[in-house]
Image: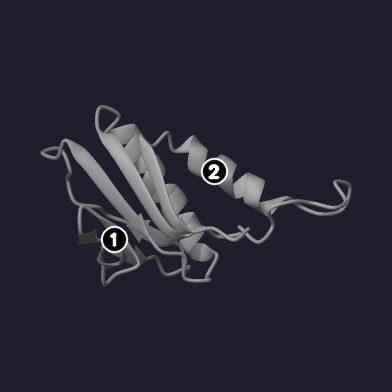
Amino acid sequence: MGCNFSINEKDVESCVSYFRNGEMKLTLPDFSDYTQLRVFWRYSGDDSSIVKLFFVMNHLKNQYADKDVILTIPYLPFSRMDRVHSTATEVFTLRYFADLINSFKCKKVVTYEVHS
C-alpha cells in the first residue's frame, strides 16, 4: 500500500483538515455499504498519528458496530519495550499500546514486524 493510513484502500490522510488552533478535524467516507472494514495503519514515528488512529478506530467502532474490522499494523510501535525491569520507574509502553489496540475490539489485528 502506498499510504500510511487507509480504510478499504481509501486514504485517511486526505480526510484530515485542521482548525486554526491546530487541532485535527476528520471527515471520513461513508462505509455503510461494506461488510468488512480493512484498516491499514503504518506508524510513522510521529506519535500524533496514534491520536489519529485512536479517533478513527473509535469512530468505526461506534458507527459500524455491525461490521468486522481488521486492523493491519506492519510495525508494532513500542514493541522494543517488551518487558520492564523496574515496575516502579519504567512505563510499560508496549502493554499500554496493546491495551489501546485491544480497546478497538477488532475482529483481527495483523502485524508483521514485532521486536523480541
Real-space CA distance between mark 1 and mark 2, rounded to the nearest whole angstrom: 19 Å
As shown in the figure, which amino acid type bears the numbered disc 1? Val
In the picture, residue 58 is in which quadrant? top left
Q: Residue furthest top?
A: 66
Asked if marks 1 and 2 touch (Cβ < 8 Å), the reply is no
Residue that badge 1 annotates: 12
In the picture, residue 90 is in which quadrant? bottom right
Please name the residue shown 29% across and 69% down the image: 3
Residue 6 locus on image (x, y percent): 28, 59
Residue 100's tag is: 2
Judge whether 107 appears above or below 4 on screen: above
Q: Earlier in the sequence, mark 1 or mark 2?
A: 1
Please name the residue shown 79% across and 51% down the image: 84
Colouring scheme applied when the structure was drawn: one colour
Please name the residue shown 74% across and 51% down the image: 83
User: At numbered mark 1, what does the secondary structure look like: helix, strand or loop?
Assistant: loop
Quarter that holds the N terminus: bottom left
User: At numbered mark 2, what does the secondary structure look like: helix, strand or loop?
Assistant: helix
Judge whether 68 appears above or below 91 on screen: above
Q: Residue furthest left?
A: 33
As shown in the figure, which amino acid type bears the numbered disc 2? Leu
Quarter that holds the C terminus: bottom right
Judge from the rendering whether residue 105 lies leftward or rightward of residue 30; answer left or right. right
